[in-house]
Image (spheres, rainbow, N blue to C red):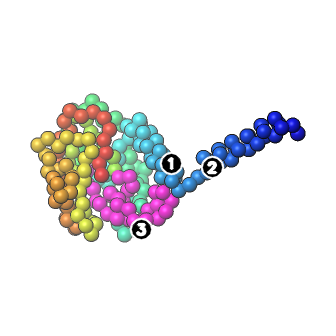
Amino acid sequence: MDQSAYSRFGRANHARRRLNLCLRPTPVYLPLLLALLAIAFVTSVDARAVSYDSRDTRDLASDEATVAVPRADNFVVGSIRGQPPTTRHFNFVVSQMNGSPDGFSKPMLVVNGLFPGPTIEANQGDRIVVHVTNTLSTRTTIHWHGLYQNGTNYYDGTAGVTECGIPPGQSLTYNFTVDDFSGTTWWQ
């Protein structure tokens, strides 16, 4: 074998080894992959205008150590665009359950036994009423990312800043109006 053929063969092996190192699955890539899959799922759900009725908790296990999956008939297919402003009611029960979203079982905070929690869909001008019950052993709040709480700053959900947090075993009802906002936000 001449030197140029050996060099080409050697370079090919070196490139293959480098490629294998780049593609080797490591624990660092797993959460990123799961996040991308979750984004793809949320995008596909939003694209079909599917909403979940969080008031229906008949299939949620309260004492089980796994994250419950809602029944298929809890999903309502249809669009809410173009409807006049209305009041949308939700019941959230914040609890802790064991789950393994990244492949390793650990305690997780869940809402209505779900991870991720229920989706809230609303139009501009809609009033959102969310009754939150805290079953954790510590205080908790719900923070509404991206929504201006003009006139309802005490519902912003920043524990220790705008509100004290919902004590263990207690409830709080968040009640605010979606003003001039269009787009996607999230709550936590």
Of the residues tagged 3 and 1, which is closer to the observer? 1
> Which marked residue is nearer to the observer: mark 2 or mark 1?
2
Residue 152 picture location, percent across and down:
13, 46
Q: Alpha-carbon neighbours of circle 1 within 10 Å: few (<14), some, or many (≥20)?
A: few
Q: Quadrant of the N terminus?
A: top right
Numbered label attached to residue 65: 3
Res 126 → quadrant: top left
Q: Rounded to the nearest whole Å, what is the CA distance between mark 3 and mark 1?
A: 25 Å
The residue drawn where x is 25% and y is 50% is: 143
**On the image, which quarter does residue 18 sit in?**
top right
* Residue shown at the point (41%, 61%) measured from the top left: 67
**Looking at the image, is mark 2 or mark 3 nearer the viewer?**
2
Q: Amino acid at mark 1?
A: Leu
Where does the image place residue 171, in percent across and percent down from the top left? 19, 61
Location of residue 4 with respect to 96 vertically, above or below: above
User: Is residue 102 located in the magenta-colored stretch of the structure?
Assistant: yes
* Labelled disc at residue 33: 1
**Residue beneath label 2, please?**
21
Bounds of the magenta segment: 90-117
Q: Going from the N terminus, do you reach mark 2 or mark 1 first?
A: 2
3D distance between C-alphas at marks 2 and 3: 37 Å
Residue at the farthest right position = 1
Q: In front: 156, or 130?
A: 156
Q: What is the secondary structure assignment of the residue under circle 1?
A: helix
For badge 2, the amino acid type reads Leu
Q: Judging from the image, what secondary structure is the residue with disc 3 in?
A: loop
Circle nearer the N terminus (3, 1): 1
Q: Position of residue 30 (x, y in %)?
A: 51, 53
In the displayed structure image, the side of residue 96 where residue 35 appears, left or right: right
Image location (x, y in percent) of residue 128 = 21, 45
Task: Describe the element under mark 2 as helix, strand or loop.
Answer: helix
